[in-house]
Image (cartoon, grey):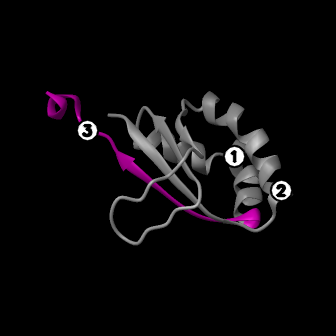
């Protein structure tokens, strides 16, 4: 079942380093099976008090695949770069099972 990595880049503390992160993250993410569905587009809040700054949505084949990418040694230095240059909220959510889609 597909799973989705939902990322809210809540605050950018070091723009230069975050630009470096954005420039370098995509190849490894794609190699791990991740596909961008949204990457920093316009946000319209319809309800609630959540005011995300920048949303990134990535589809993986499974939650396990998303977690493998996040935990991978290939991503470790980039994860550290992102964590040091931004304040981020990140989660993995399972998609709808095929039988539930019908």
Is 92 magenta? The answer is yes
When asked about the image quadrant of residue 81, the answer is: bottom right
Residue occupying image coordinates x 76% and y 63%? 85
Residue bearing the label numbered 2: 17
Badge 2 crowding class, 10 Å Cα cut-off, few under 14, some 14 to 19, many 20 or more, is some
Q: Where is residue 62 drawn, in percent x and y?
A: 40, 37
Earlier sequence position, callout 2 versus callout 3: 2
Q: Which residue is mark 1?
A: 75
Q: Mark 1 and mark 2 in contact? Answer it, CB < 8 Å.
A: no
* Label 1 vs 2, first from the N-terminus: 2
Indicate the quadrant containing the C terminus: top left, top right, bottom left or bottom right.
Answer: top left
Left or right: residue 7 versus residue 17 is: left
Badge 3 marks a residue whose secondary structure is: loop
What residue span does the magenta drawing correspond to? 84-102
Specify whether residue 52 is painted magenta: no
Label for residue 27? none
Mark found first going from the N terminus, 3 or 1 = 1
Q: Secondary structure at mark 1?
A: helix
Q: Residues within 10 Å of mark 1 (few under 14, many from 20)?
A: some
């Amino acid at each position: 079942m597909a799973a989705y990595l939902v990322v809210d880049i809540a605050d950018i503390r070091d723009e230069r380093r975050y630009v470096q992160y954005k420039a370098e993250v995509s190849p490894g993410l794609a190699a791990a099976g991740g596909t961008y569905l949204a990457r920093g587009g316009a946000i319209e809040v319809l309800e609630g008090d959540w005011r995300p700054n920048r949303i990134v949505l990535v589809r993986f084949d499974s939650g396990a695949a998303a977690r493998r990418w996040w935990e991978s040694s290939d991503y470790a230095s980039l994860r550290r770069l992102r964590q040091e240059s931004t304040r981020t909220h990140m989660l993995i959510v399972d998609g709808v099972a095929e039988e539930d889609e019908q």
